[in-house]
Image (spheres, rainbow, N blue to C red):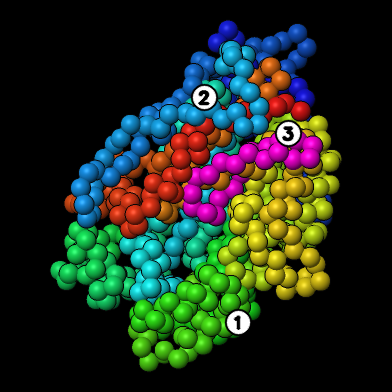
């Protein structure tokens, strides 16, 4: 496996990757292999770069364009530099800046040899976003009323997910280079739960946030917000009202004009890097847990009635039916809603709130309106449409391949699994690329793939657990990392397989505090080991908020601060130091 990108201190001359970045070339190199799909085998859509003429260096061949100086390690805007943290006190706490998190070297799978920083060669660098949960907060088919049973069942910042996501895009665009190596960033990948309620509104907002454009994060009545936050129900934070709701009693502010600002038009610059999309359970199913097929629930989603309140006992029963996997097809919630029609409030119907199917999910990614920085389809292809699948491979960098899986279980429930056909495809793909390093992406973690309910479209196909997937990955020496989300918590786990070792990197969500994403760098230490460096990043919004600033940026800052006060386990979700900014060492195979 040849390597081309030196980042040693003694080799600060311009390398091929720096030239390509400076020339605004796409940062995926020739020789990556093929973007294999279940029904097609064709060259990746990114065109290969032409080699320099014989006897001519890469730098010379690019002399027509100005060449930027080689980049040093770049930590600005990362959690190595600083992190948002609540100030001391009780009740509602304002945010400020705290010292950054140091990098922890983990040697669970291999020893870290001295001098490796001076020898290493960069293989790939990319950004992982996960669990954005772009929320249509006025959607009738939401479960806000579960707040009566659990404080963390509803978020007071849900109306600001678009503003928060755009600010995260701004942060990614501001990263001039990878934090450790200074190499150009190759791409961005989202590992699922990009939307929250499988609604067309949310899918459009997500794709526009990523590709660039204007978004009005509102549905129903185009003139004003109509949902639980102006309902007068004291269970929820009523930001514009003078009433002492449950949240104001905890110190949440009154913000006159907040809801009008929340549904105002937002402008996203779109990512400047190529980006790829992985499907999560909230993308695949209504509310992330109910299988498709109930026509009554589909009609309710687009209709003009919305239930906003339940008793604590009713909310507890419904919550248990979901968490205990007793209602995969939505029968319990459908019957409950039917029994409570007289308690529902009138809202404006909106056909855009309809649930989308897996085929519509893929088709939307293929829409030229959402191409942005590319590639076309963001990993998905016409082959996926024809086969009815949502898994694929894509080029990461020279001699590094990415594999995006679909771990959602169409039979219902939020935990996942993988079907036999996909598992066999994965095995065959890894064998076909045995001389290429492989990074696997999925939404679910190994521990959260415990739902083996049959897929209604393939009732005879066996479903496989995370333990089975982990074992398969461990049988392939070329697998170096499995990158995922779902659990809304930073967690990094070493795996020792039958033939090789790899790291499982799970990243916290962007809807719960501390609202993080992750830069991941793969390097060859030139001593028989590889290292995976992980560096967490926050959105570009300032840590400190101003209650009078309801601009797009001001709302993004409030999004973070409100989330920090919504629940009290932010420290748990950020993980331990060994799960945050790390160097993960493993043997080179």
Work out whether residue 41 can be spotted: no
* Element at label 2: loop
The span from disc 1 to disc 2 (Cα, nearest Å) is 50 Å
The span from disc 2 to disc 3 (Cα, nearest Å) is 20 Å
Residue tagged 3: 437
Residue drawn where x is 18% and y is 61% of the image? 254
Residue 380 left/right relative to 506: right
The mark found on residue 294 in the picture is 1
Where is residue 390, by image quadrant?
Answer: bottom right
- Residue 279, given in percent of the width and then of the height, sits at 61, 56
Residue extending farthest to the left is 242
Where is residue 395, by image quadrant?
Answer: top right
Residue drawn where x is 68% and y is 54% of the image? 466
Residue tagged 2: 180
Stretch in magenta: 483-503
Residue 123 left/right relative to 589: left
Residue 248 lies in magenta, yes or no?
no
Q: Is residue 53 above or below residue 378?
A: above
- Return the residue nearer the eye: 294 or 81: 81
Q: Earlier in the sequence, mark 3 or mark 1?
A: 1
- Return the residue nearer the eye: 480 or 74: 480
Whether pointer 1 and pointer 2 mark residues with C-beta atoms closer than 8 Å, the reply is no
Residue 496 lies in magenta, yes or no?
yes
Closer to the eye: label 3 or 1: 3
- Residue 32, given in percent of the width and then of the height, sits at 75, 33
Q: Earlier in the sequence, mark 1 or mark 2?
A: 2
Residue drawn where x is 61% and y is 21% of the image? 112
Where is residue 23, by image quadrant?
Answer: top right
* Element at label 3: strand
């Amino acid at each position: 496996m040849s390597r081309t990108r030196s980042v040693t201190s003694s080799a600060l001359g311009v390398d091929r990757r720096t030239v390509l970045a400076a020339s605004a070339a796409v940062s995926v190199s020739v020789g990556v292999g093929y973007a294999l799909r279940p029904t097609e085998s064709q060259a990746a859509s990114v065109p290969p770069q032409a080699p320099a003429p014989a006897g001519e260096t890469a730098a010379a061949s690019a002399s027509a364009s100005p060449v930027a100086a080689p980049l040093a390690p770049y930590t600005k805007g990362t959690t190595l530099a600083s992190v948002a943290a609540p100030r001391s006190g009780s009740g509602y706490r304002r945010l400020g800046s705290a010292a950054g998190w140091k990098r922890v070297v983990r040697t669970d799978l291999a020893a870290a040899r001295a001098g490796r920083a001076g020898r290493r060669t960069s293989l790939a660098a990319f950004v992982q976003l996960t669990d954005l949960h772009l929320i249509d907060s006025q959607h009738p088919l939401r479960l806000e009323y579960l707040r009566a049973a659990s404080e963390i069942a509803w978020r007071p910042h849900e109306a600001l997910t678009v503003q928060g996501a755009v600010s995260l895009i701004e942060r990614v665009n501001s990263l001039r280079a990878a934090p450790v190596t200074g190499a150009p960033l190759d791409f961005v990948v989202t590992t699922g739960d990009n939307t929250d309620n499988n609604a067309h509104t949310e899918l459009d907002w997500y794709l526009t946030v990523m590709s660039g454009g204007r978004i009005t994060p509102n549905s129903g009545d185009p003139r004003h917000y109509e949902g639980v936050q102006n309902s007068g129900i004291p269970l929820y934070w009523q930001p514009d009202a003078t009433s002492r709701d449950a949240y104001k009693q905890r110190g949440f502010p009154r913000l006159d004009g907040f809801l009008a600002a929340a549904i105002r038009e937002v402008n996203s610059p779109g990512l400047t890097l190529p980006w790829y999309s992985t499907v999560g359970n909230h993308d695949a199913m209504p509310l992330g847990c109910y299988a498709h097929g109930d026509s009554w629930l589909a009609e309710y989603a687009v209709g003009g009635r919305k239930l906003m309140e339940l008793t604590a006992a009713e909310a507890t029963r419904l919550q248990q039916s979901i968490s205990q996997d007793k209602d995969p097809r939505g029968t319990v919630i459908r019957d409950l809603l039917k029994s409570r029609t007289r308690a529902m409030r009138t809202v404006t119907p909106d056909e855009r709130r309809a649930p989308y199917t897996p085929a519509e999910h893929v088709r939307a990614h293929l829409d030229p309106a959402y191409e942005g920085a590319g590639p076309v389809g963001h990993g998905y292809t016409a082959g996926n449409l024809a086969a009815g699948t949502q898994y694929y491979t894509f080029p990461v960098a020279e001699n590094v391949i990415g594999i995006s899986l679909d771990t959602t279980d169409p039979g219902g429930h939020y935990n996942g699994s993988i079907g036999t056909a996909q598992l066999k495809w994965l095995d065959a793909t890894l064998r076909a690329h045995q001389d290429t390093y492989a990074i696997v992406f999925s939404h679910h973690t190994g521990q959260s793939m415990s739902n083996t309910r049959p897929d209604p479209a393939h009732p005879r196909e066996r479903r496989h657990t995370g333990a089975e997937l982990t074992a398969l990955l461990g049988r392939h020496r070329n697998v170096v990392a499995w990158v995922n989300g779902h659990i809304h918590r930073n967690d990094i786990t070493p795996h020792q397989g039958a033939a090789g070792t790899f790291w499982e990197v799970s990243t916290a969500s962007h809807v719960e505090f501390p609202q993080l994403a992750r830069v991941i760098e793969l390097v060859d230490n030139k001593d028989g080991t590889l290292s995976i460096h992980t560096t967490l990043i926050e959105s570009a919004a300032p840590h400190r908020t101003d209650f009078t600033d309801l601009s797009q940026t001001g709302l993004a800052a409030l999004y973070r601060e409100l989330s920090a006060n919504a629940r009290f386990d932010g420290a748990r979700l950020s993980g331990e130091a060994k799960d945050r900014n790390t160097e993960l060492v493993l043997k080179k195979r």
